[in-house]
Amino acid sequence: MGKILEIENVSAGYGEEIVLKDVNLVINDNDFIGIIGPNGGGKTTLLRLIIGLIRPYRGSVKFFDDSRERSGGSIGYLPQISHTDPRFPISVIDVVLSGLMSKEGLFSRYPARLKRRAEELLNRLGIEDLKKKNIGELSGGQLQRVYLCRAIISSPRLLMLDEPSTFVDTMFETDFYGILKQLNRDMAIIVVSHDVGTISWYVKTIACVNRNLHYHPSNVITQEQLAAYNCPIQIITHGDIPHTVLEMHKHPK
């Protein structure tokens, strides 16, 4: 199993505000990590740090070369999605193909094999019939599926998802995480979510981010561990999934 990246003693934030402090994390091939923590604790900041949208104030983020040949970039990213301008003139399939820009270039004509791959991904997520629609005509759940296709079309080594269930309809949610589990055979995955009751069934390990990062090498996490990690979270459950409701605990002064 190869190492993808290593975060060492990183502090980061925005302006004078420190959001993450003394963070350490190693991500290896085929990891499936659930990132949990309170709002404002630094979960999205951690993803932005990995992508390179922000630089650490101190510490380092090291990427390691992959000896395997891949068809595109090393990282696929599915951000939180709120809305899309319905006037924006781009079709669903072109949005998916835009995930190949780093390899093919902004104004490239995509060969037939890549268009077929885009169609295969849309079909896999149940929205192939929408491929010619304008992106602004889609519902939130449909839009989330399109952007997942865009994130994985380049077969990235690491896929990162920021609150992916936000706009996924309930009927599709189980299939969505099932698809992630299949993708995990070929790539490492990081999922940021408040829904610990669901992701704990799919992820392999959990990291709590609340200014600091506490890595837990299992998908089972206890009330005592959360308290020790200073990680207040909300548990959301679905259907008949067994669950434990955790008590509220106070932040140390």
Image: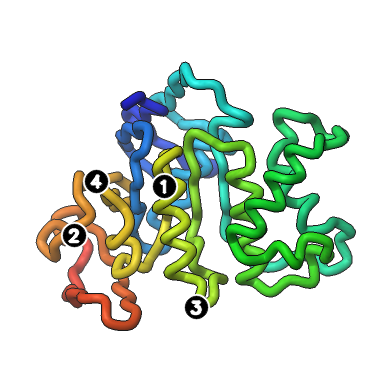
Q: Amino acid at mark 2?
A: Leu
Q: Position of residue 194 (x, y in %)?
A: 38, 66
Which numbered mark, 1 or 3, is in the foreground of this view? 3
- Is the Cβ of the residue at disc 4 closer than 8 Å to that at disc 1? no
Mark 2: which secondary structure? helix
Compared to 43, does 136 lie above or below? below
Q: Earlier in the sequence, mark 1 or mark 3?
A: 3
Real-space Cα separation, disc 2 to disc 3, in angstroms: 30 Å
Q: Which amino acid type corresponds to the residue marked 1 in the rendered image?
A: Ile
Cα–Cα span, label 3 and label 4: 33 Å
Where residue 68 appears, as percent x and y from the top left, is 49, 21
Q: Residue furthest bottom?
A: 239
Dot label at residue 190:
1
From mark 4 to mark 1, how far is it between C-alphas? Answer: 15 Å
Image coords of residue 205 (percent x, y) = 26, 48
Colouring used for the render? rainbow
